Amino acid sequence: MYWEKDLETLDRKELERRQLEQINWTIRQARNSSFYSGLKINRIDSLEAIQDLPLTTKEDLRNQFPYGFLAVDRERVIRLHSSSGTTGKPTVVFHTREDIDRWQNLIARSMYAVGVRKNDVFQNIMGYGLFTGGIGFHYGAELLGVMTIPIGPGNSKRQIWFLKHLRTSVVHILPSYALRLYTFFDELNIDPKKDLNLKIALIGAEPHSNEIRKKIEELYGIKAYNSYGLSEMCGPGVAFECTQQAGLHVWEDHFYPEIIDPDSMQVLPEGEEGELVLTTLSREAMPIIRYRTRDLTSLIPGNCPCGRTHRRISRIKGRNDDMLIINGVNIFPIQIERTVMAIPEIGNNYLIEIRKKDYMDKLLLKVEVNEQVFQGTLSELEKLQRKIIVELREELDLTPEVKLVESASLPVSDGKAKRVYDFR
C-alpha cells in the first residue's frame, strides 16, 4: 500500500516541522542564484510566515533565461527540461543527479500508491525528450522494478499490438489519446475488456474532467488515476491520487502548497478554490519559492481514508489563462467537458469555437455522438441537441449553439488535445 510508509504517514506536526526546516534550507539554497540573491528574508519562524516571501511567476523564469535561477555550479547539472516556449521565450529547468533521484523516487511512490507492482508490464504512451511526462514515469517505473515499454505516443495500431501481445497491465497516457485509441479496437476486432490485460491507466498532462476519467474506465474496464505535475517543480510526481480517488496527495515532504486568491494574492483557507502556489523543499539545482502555477484548485479538508497524511488538492479546474469571457460571462472549457461527457449519447470528442457576429460573441460546440445515435431519426437528434443546449445553459449561464457530428469526424492529435478555437 505504501512505498515509503514512514514518510507518507508522518504525523502532521512532524511533517510541518520538517517543512519549515526545508523551507529555510530552500531559502539559503535559492540565494545562490542570481534571481534570489537579493532576497531580503533569510529565514522564517513559522509556516504562515512563508506569505512574507515574494511570489515567483513564469514570466520571471522567462526573463531569467537561461541561468538566472541556477543555484549550483553548472558542472553539477546533469539534466535540463524545457517548456515548448509557444507563447514566448521557453522556460528551462535544471536538475542535479540528486534531484533526478528524488524525482524518480516520487514517481515510484505515486505508482505504488495506485497498485503498480513489480510483476506489472508498463507501457509508456507519453512523449519523451524535453517534455517531462514520459521520461519521468519511465525512470520511476524502472526504480519500482516494472518492465517498461518506452513506446511513446502515436501509431495507434502498433500501440494496441503491444498492449495485446505484451500483456500490458499499466499505461501512462493522455486522457484524450485514451479515447482516440479506443476507436481502433473495432477495426482490429479486439474487445479491450476481454482481450487485454490492462488494469490501470495513469492519466494527466492535460486538464480533464471526472466525466472523461469515468468514460475511460467504462470503455476499458480499468481504473484511471489522475496525476499532477509541472516542469517548473520537476514534472509529474508533484501530486497523485491514491486508490480512494478522493483528491490528489501533494507530496508535502518535497513541495509546500498554498492556495491564493489570484486577484488579491491572499492565502485562502482549506476548501476554498483559488490558484495553486508551490515551493520546492528539496531541489538543489533550481529551487523555486512560491511559484504561481496558474492552476485552479482547492485544498481538501480532512484526512484521506488511505492513511496518508499529505494534504490533497481537488481536480484541477483549469488555468487562470484558460478562462474564456463570452459576452461578459466567465467560463472554463472544463465546465463544458464535464457537462457534455456526462450525457450517455455523446462520443469521445468535442470542439469549442468562439467567433464574433454582429459585435457579439458566439459560442459553437461541435460534439461527436455515438454511431447508433447519429443514425437515428431527425427528431431524436434534435431532442439530443436541445438537451445539450439546456444543460449547458444551466451550467454556463449562456446559450451556446450546438452542432452534432458523426463519431471520429473531428480532428484529433497524438499530443495534448486542442479543443478551443477562439477566432475573435
Image: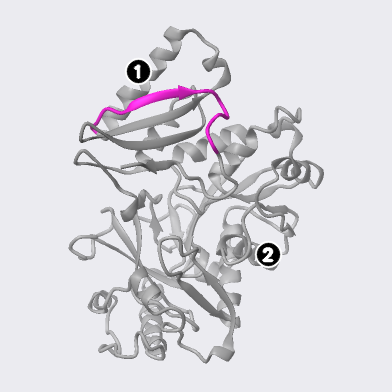
Q: Nearer the viewer, residue 50 or 231?
A: 231
Task: Confirm whether residue 306 shows in the render.
Answer: yes
In the picture of the structure, the residue carrying the numbered disc 2 is: 144
Left or right? Give the position of 26 relative to 225: left
Left or right? Give the position of 98 relative to 230: right
In the image, residue 388 lies at what x, y percent? 37, 23
| Figure quadrant of residue 183 | top right
In the image, residue 361 lies at what x, y percent? 25, 36
What is the secondary structure assignment of the residue under circle 2? helix
Q: Is residue 146 above or below residue 143?
A: above
Magenta residues, as a range? 397-411
Give the residue type at disc 1. Arg
Left or right? Give the position of 217 relative to 21: right
Q: Quadrant of the N terminus?
A: bottom right
Residue 325 painted magenta: no
Disc 2 versus disc 1: nearer the observer: 1
Q: Quadrant of the C terminus?
A: top left
In the image, residue 33 lies at what x, y percent? 41, 88
Q: Is residue 152 above or below residue 30?
A: above
Task: Give the numbered dot on residue 386.
Answer: 1
